[in-house]
Image (cartoon, helix red, strand yellow):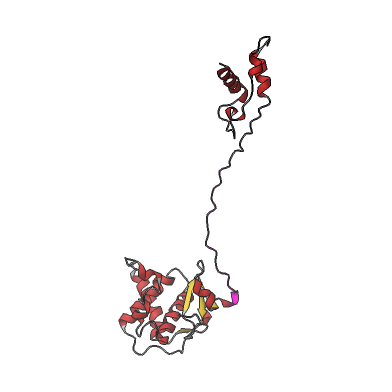
């Protein structure tokens, strides 16, 4: 009876049923025996007084924390590193054994790697393909360079992206310029510049090389061990 009465009064004293408490009355051992002795005029008042000694701590409301959207941290590059259309020169050496198939492989790879970039940026990406072909470690034809194992992320996809007729003509022209007409990107035409990556990723190998240029969404490196 004592317990029932005490808990009933505690329910009134505690207030809102929606409150969240860190502890319960039953855990504190509030003694209300004296309220049940003869001569107590008001049991309810006595119980309330006894329960005043019990001050449960209300848990702090937990604010809903919305996780921040993680944005890729872009690699910082110097403006002087940026490739422009003025860096695309003529008078270089093309590939005298270039085939139509090789031109198409390069054209499609530039389309996939830098299709949404400026034309100068597309030449920059294509120049690294050319450097790799001339260096020889990735194959002795452009198609072998392009489809060398896990070198360009798009080659790992199960489906090919279809390019429009207009896109095919444009990127074929860029590829022919590099492979046949002797166009080259002056800042990047070196067999030591064989790697690049998107500005929103930081591959481990980048720490081992030296940044030499940027073009659109890509950063270019020389002397990367492979």
Q: Is 73 positioned to the left or the right of 149 in the image? A: right
Residue 87, percent across and down?
52, 81
Relative height, residue 90 to residue 170 (above, below)? below
Relative height, residue 21 to residue 196 (above, below)? above
Q: Relative to the observer, which residue lies in front, 179 or 138?
A: 138
Relative height, residue 159 to residue 174 (above, below)? above
Q: Quadrant of residue 113?
A: bottom left
Taking the spot 58% from the left edge, 41% from the top edge, the residue there is 62
Q: Quadrant of residue 18?
A: top right
Can the viewer see residue 173 in this picture?
A: yes
Q: Relative to the observer, which residue lies in front, 193 or 164?
A: 193
Taking the spot 34% from the left edge, 80% from the top edge, the residue there is 144
Residue 183, percent across and down?
44, 85
Taking the spot 55% from the left edge, 16% from the top edge, the residue there is 1
Q: Relative to the observer, which residue lies in front, 218 or 85?
A: 218
The residue range painted magenta reads 64-80
Taking the spot 52% from the left edge, 57% from the top edge, the residue there is 70
- 127 in the magenta segment: no
Residue 41, percent across and down?
68, 10
Can the viewer see residue 170 in this picture?
A: no
Quarter of the image with the C terminus in it: bottom left
Dominant SS type (magenta): loop
- 75 in the magenta segment: yes
Residue 74, percent across and down?
54, 66
């Amino acid at each position: 009876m004592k317990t029932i009465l005490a808990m009933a009064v505690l329910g009134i004293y505690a207030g809102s049923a929606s409150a969240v408490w860190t502890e319960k009355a039953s855990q504190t051992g509030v003694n209300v025996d004296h309220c049940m002795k003869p001569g107590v005029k008001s049991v309810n008042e006595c119980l309330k007084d006894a329960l005043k000694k019990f001050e449960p701590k209300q848990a702090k409301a937990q604010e809903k924390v919305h996780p921040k959207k993680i944005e890729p941290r872009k690699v910082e590059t110097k403006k002087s590193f940026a490739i422009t259309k003025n860096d695309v020169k003529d008078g270089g050496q093309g590939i005298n054994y270039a085939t139509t198939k090789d031109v198409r492989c390069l054209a499609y790879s530039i389309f996939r790697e830098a299709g949404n970039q400026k034309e100068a940026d597309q030449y920059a990406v294509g120049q690294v393909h050319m450097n790799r072909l001339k260096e020889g470690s990735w194959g002795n034809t452009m198609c072998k360079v392009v489809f060398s194992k896990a070198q360009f992320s798009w080659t790992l996809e199960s489906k090919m992206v279809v390019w429009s007729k207009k896109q095919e003509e444009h990127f074929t022209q860029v590829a022919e310029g590099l492979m046949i007409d002797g166009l080259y990107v002056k800042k990047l035409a070196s067999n030591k510049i064989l790697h690049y990556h998107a500005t929103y990723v930081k591959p481990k190998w980048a720490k081992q090389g030296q940044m030499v240029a940027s073009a659109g969404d890509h950063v270019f490196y020389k002397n990367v061990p492979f």
